[in-house]
Amino acid sequence: MAKSSKKNNNNNNLSSTLFSSLMIFIISRSSSPCEAQKNTMFSGEVLGMRSSLWYGNYILIMQADCNLILFDGGREVWSTNTSGKGSFCHLKMQSDANLVTYNYNDKPVWSTKTYRRNENYMLVLQKDRNVVIYGTAFWSTKT
């Protein structure tokens, strides 16, 4: 029993260390010293109505009408197609790895359906325009 607990603690420590290292790497690679850019959301964080993540010319914005849209230089390149499905909406990066748009009654309007176990996750608007959810390591060689 004690050996199993120790092994789980080692796996948790490894996962936490890898996640922290990944976060530091991504943030350091995506920030410029001259300009503060908000291109990440962590588990539990909320992107409010009319708020956005951005990287260079890329903007991911949570509109008041519940539509989450990714723009590249003012041109729409992706959306959740949820315009008019609610109002006063917000986007939440949940600790179960699911990214969810909620309306003013906290009813889900859209989600990524990326359920995992409760851990630390991070949404990143990357320099290649891709929006990605990163999480802890699921496997390693432990070397």
Image (cartoon, rainbow, N blue to C red):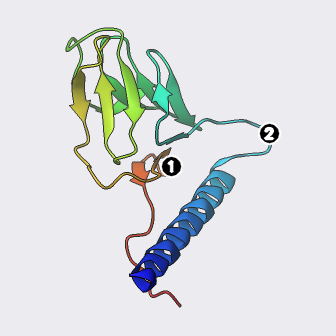
- Residue at the image position 44 percent from the left and 69 percent from the top: 137
Mark found first going from the N terminus, 2 or 1: 2
Q: Which amino acid type is marked by label 2?
A: Cys
Is 116 placed left or right of 133 in the picture?
Answer: left
Identify residue for label 1.
Answer: 126
- Residue at the image position 30 percent from the left and 8 percent from the top: 87
The circle drawn on residue 34 is: 2
> Secondary structure beneath disc 1?
loop
Q: Say few, some or many: other residues with alpha carbon within 10 Å of mark 2 (under 14 / 14 to 19 / 20 or more).
A: few
Q: Is residue 111 visible?
A: yes
- Residue at the image position 55 percent from the left and 34 percent from the top: 54
* CA distance for labels 2 and 1: 18 Å
Depth order, front residue of 123/42: 42
> Secondary structure beneath disc 2?
loop
Above/below status of 59 relative to 3: above
Above/below status of 54 relative to 7: above
Give the image location of residue 57, x and y in percent. Answer: 55, 35
Give the image location of residue 30, x and y in percent. Answer: 63, 50
Q: Quadrant of the N terminus?
A: bottom left
